[in-house]
Amino acid sequence: MTFINKLKDFAVKSPWLYRINGGSCNGCDVELATTACIPRYDVERLGCQYCGSPRHADIVLITGPLTRRVLDAARRVYDEIPDPKVTVAVGVCPISGGIFRESYAVCAPIDQYFPVDVNVPGCPPRPQAIIEGVAKAIAIWRQRL
Amino acid sequence: MNFLTLFARNLWHGPYTDVFPFGPATTPEHLRARITFDPKQCEGCRLCEKVCPAGAIRFTRTPGGMTFDCWHATCVFCGTCEFYCPTKAVKQSNDWHLAHEQGEKYAQVEHGLIPNQICVECGAKALDTSPAVSHIKPPLSETEVSELRARCPKCRNKYLRSRKTS
Amino acid sequence: MTSQIATLLAVLLFPGGLFALVLGLALKGADRRVAARLQGRVGPPLIQPFFDLIKLGFKRTMVPTEASETVFLAAPLVGSVAMLISAALIPIAGVYAPDTELGNLLVLLYLLAVPGICLMLAGSASGSPYGAIGFSREMALMLAYEGPIVLIVAAVGMRTGMAEGHWVTFSLTEIVRYQQVHGWFLFDPIMWPAVAAFAFFYPANLGIVPFDIPEAETEVLEGPLLEYSGPALGLFKVMSALKAVVVLGLGIALFLPLPFTGPLAFVGWLVEIVVLMLVGVTALRVSAGRMRIDQAFVFFLKWPLLLAIASVAAVALAAGGAS
């Protein structure tokens, strides 16, 4: 049992990130790219890696207020991600709707469609705040493994 | 061959990375992040509620007074509230540690209460707001401000008028 | 019987199997770490690929409903096993010489094509349009680079064989032994076209950045690997780690085997392979941008093929002039 736990402790050091753009303005997506590409933030230190395919993902980062058009596609992509997975809402739009709140065209907040685990508010959030959110998500992911 | 010099520099200098998740983070002094509210300084003009583009700020009349609530999960950190606040009761700090788990989503609120008080002159119940004194000439002294503060809006007007005539 | 056990050990333990796997994963880790350092970042820990593998073991393998399940699940397995066997075919100068019964350079050439074919099968079996695009790109790239590598190997074999008195040799052990006596082919002007052609071949075979067109994650979402998850994806990672060891080991055996024996030779080989990985793969990967598939195809049919033909011609002419 302790051996399995030890292995899980190792496994948790390799969270692969996948981002779903739910009709975002791209501000948050730029900050997500910044966390990986700018030497100052370097999310790869935590073992994170942005992967192109939802099948490889462990931590899902959802940006944007989830426009009505993208809702169906986003839910289908979300279901493609194998368990165990952790969902992080990045930016104020997915958390509450932000400045798009109560618009007829958006489905925010997204927690009525996805089981969100961690929220990272900001418009856009600071890259370091995103790293903090990912670190929180990793702690949750460890419990689910 | 530009990239070779870049490689050499990066190898020589070492990484430029912040220690953040494993240590303290560097934060710019004027970063616009968490909103703070000081009920002692609030005038009760509710201008911030009016100008907030995301509708994050809400004032509510309660039996105990007037409450201020700013929900950080919808605030876009534009800084308009601080800009328009006449007494700078609403301020933006540079504390960006706002990431939270889903259970704490509705606890991400900056809460403040402007309490009710009894007017010293007429005995009516009114809000203990900071008096709007910045435009008054000649400027009020400290004691005059505190006298003004202890009154209800009607009695404040009366007080200022009597000050003008005397 | 003992020789069979020795062969089995060579495939499963050293230099194939466990040793090659650990070395390949460590090389990948060093590659990621040094790439991060070249970009001014800290990067993941050295043993990050091991963490990745363990993580993938805990995940679930999903098989798409459109996929052909048998081929979909068999492809990574076949690729990894082919790489395990070919790792045992690579001689380490002064330490290990492969059993002649296990195979020679020709077998190695066929086995080297297996991972590419497995990726193609995986892409087409996954039933995803991205996989299909990855399949067609992988095939185009393989068509482009398989020609040069055959000619390179032929040139090296002819050079050794003619010097030894017969026409051509396909024994890597003999090639290594010849170079241990007569010096590296790397410093032999007649072999320079072959060295240059090999320098173009290995990035394409390893699928690193200028030629990672089939698995471009920004264009075709990792192409053939798109539908894979969990242990099956882990097997593909194992395959690519082993492939790094095999292809770089082949390069060392063909052009720069060390003239030592014993532990010194082993340490020297390790140093060689690490240096090749860091200079040849990491620095290239970090400094180059991805080519388009048509550009890469035309490029491979132009320069590496030309260089490979030139090397065969040069070897033949040199042998003709000497005799």
Image (cartoon, coloured by chain):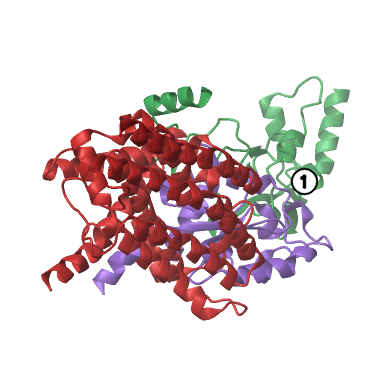
Chain colours: A purple, B green, C red
**Residue B91 appears at what percent x and percent y?**
65, 38
Please tell me how many numbered marks the rendered image carries. Answer: 1
Specify the subunit that label 1 lies on. B
- Looking at the rendered image, the quarter that the C terminus of chain C falls into is top left
Please name whichever residue, C109 or A79, is drawn nearer the observer in this view of the structure: C109
Determine crowd level at label 1: few under 14, some 14-19, many 20+ residues with C-alpha closer than 10 A. many
Q: Residue at x 81, y 46 (%)?
A: B50
Please name whichever residue, B161 or B2, is drawn nearer the observer in this view of the structure: B2
Q: Which residue is drawn at 47% across and 75% down?
A: C73
In the rendered image of this protein, does residue C129 appear above or below residue C181?
below
Q: Which amino acid does label 1 sit on?
A: Cys
Reading the image, the residue beneath label 1 is B52
Q: Can residue A36 be seen in this view?
A: no
Q: Residue at x 57, y 73 (%)?
A: C125
- Looking at the rendered image, the quarter that the N terminus of chain C falls into is bottom left
Q: Is residue C249 visible?
A: yes
Q: Is residue A128 left or right of C196 when viewed as pictured?
A: right
Q: Is residue C175 left or right of C127 when viewed as pictured?
A: left
Q: Is residue B95 left or right of C169 when viewed as pictured?
A: right
Dot 1 falls on a residue whose secondary structure is loop
Please name whichever residue, C167 or A37, is drawn nearer the observer in this view of the structure: C167
